Image (cartoon, helix red, strand yellow):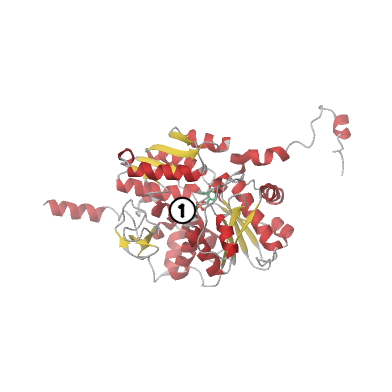
Amino acid sequence: MAVQTIVAAETNSPAPFGPAVALSCRECGERFPLSPVFACEACFGPLEVAYDLPSGDPEGLKKQIAAGPDNIWRYAPLLPVPADVTTKPNLNPGFTKLVKADNLARELGITGGLHIKDDSGNPTHSFKDRVVAIALEAARTFGLTTLSCSSTGNLAGAVGAAAARAGFRSCVFIPHDLEAGKVVMAAVYGGELVGIEGNYDDVNRFCSELIGDPIGEGWGFVNVNLRPYYGEGSKTLAYEICEQLGWRLPDNLVIPIASGSQLTKIDKGLQELIKLGLVEDKPYKIYGAQAEGCSPVSAAFKAGHDVVRPVKPDTIAKSLAIGNPADGPYVLDIARRTGGAVEDVNDEQIVDAIKLLARTEGIFAETAGGVTVGVLRKLIESGQLDPAAETVVLNTGDGLKTLDAVAPTTGPTATIRPTLDAFRAAGLAGS
Ligand SMILES: *Cc1c(COP(=O)(O)O)cnc(C)c1O
């Protein structure tokens, strides 16, 4: 009788992880059951989600996707989530704009076409809503009750908001010296926010200790013990870009690097689309972007090294300030395998690029967007990126969260008395 009840329950509710079948080690390939773990028991390599994807009918799959909602759940058949995911409270991020950036292309001398994938349009104004949405579903399935993270700012806000909506307790950890916009965004949703006296790498170490302690029981750290699920959220950027291009691969993608998770999972997403026949197979190049003040991956790329030597971050691009990036070696592999590169820009170039993007396309990016656009410009100037090829550059966050970056060099053209004479005297009349 009991057995029959269990069988009935299983057939009535959709598979909790959809097409996902296991966790697999990226180093040794060992497989593990889907659970809240992130490192291989055999070799300590990072685990990722492995699938049995719905192959064989690409046109049917495209139709199914097109009939789905205008958010990441349209790709539920390719994600580790149950088929009824849309019935659960979630922030439903994604399907952000892919903006054809003709003005910026002209300014940079790009003739092959340029698009900005503008993820500032997500619910908490950064790409992090994508990764949190998937981690949240995993936390629900595993019965975890507290949602947590170590964050460079945007993730804390995304976790706080998602937890509030889904009815989880949240407790998030950030370096104590983040931008005011990031701190307010992380706190406003009512969860607990803890500033740690140290940089992101200190915060991350602290969180790893917390997970190993009885205090951390029942906690889902989206980017630690739920990291394999979290990472899958970034694949949706690859899916959206290709779908929005009319189910086509671009030639080049320029992607920011913090831990490197986003870049590696965008590549994973593109590979899946090729394997499933949703896009025609052709070469594409992936370029990674870092701030000079935190450029361990860029330094390793330029030196031809396979290992990434950790650094102490010192940059205005705080959302990318991870000195010891977990996915750094995989980023190097992907940049080299695809014929791309990893490049960095300094703080002044980041600010210039934020203003360039705003002036040419009306998009106000946070410092991470300044890093990608600045790196795009540098790659063209140095001949590393072909201007005759089609390029997609990511803006992963909203400039309103990092006002301090541009405030010192941006302001009113003039401040005048409310008279025409004063306006004329300011030299702004005519022309
Ligand atoms: C977190 C973040 C990234 C990239 O993070 P990864 O750790 O490399 O996945 C990029 N841009 C912004 C704005 C971010 O907050």
Residue at mark 1: C-beta within 8 A of ligand 1: no
Residue to which mark 1 is pinned? 72
Work out whether residue 239 or residue 66 is closer to the camera in this orientation and state it.
239
Image position of 402 with respect to 41: above or below: above
The residue at 59%/44% (across/down) is 398
The residue at 33%/46% (across/down) is 140
Residue 168, image x and y in percent? 37, 38
Compared across the picture, whether 60 is left or right of 7 comes to right
Residue 115, image x and y in percent? 62, 58
Compared across the picture, whether 347 is left or right of 144 comes to right
Label 1 Cα crowd, 10 Å radius (few <14 / some 14-19 / many 20+): many
Compared across the picture, whether 96 is left or right of 43 comes to right
Q: Secondary structure at mark 1?
A: helix
Q: Quadrant of the C terminus?
A: top right
Q: Is residue 341 visible?
A: no
In the current view of this chain or complex, which residue is farthest to the left? 1
Work out whether residue 190 or residue 5 is closer to the camera in this orientation and state it.
190
Q: Which quadrant holds residue 385?
A: bottom right
Residue 296, image x and y in percent? 56, 55
Name the kind of residue labelled 1 in the image. Ile
Image position of 417 with respect to 79: above or below: above
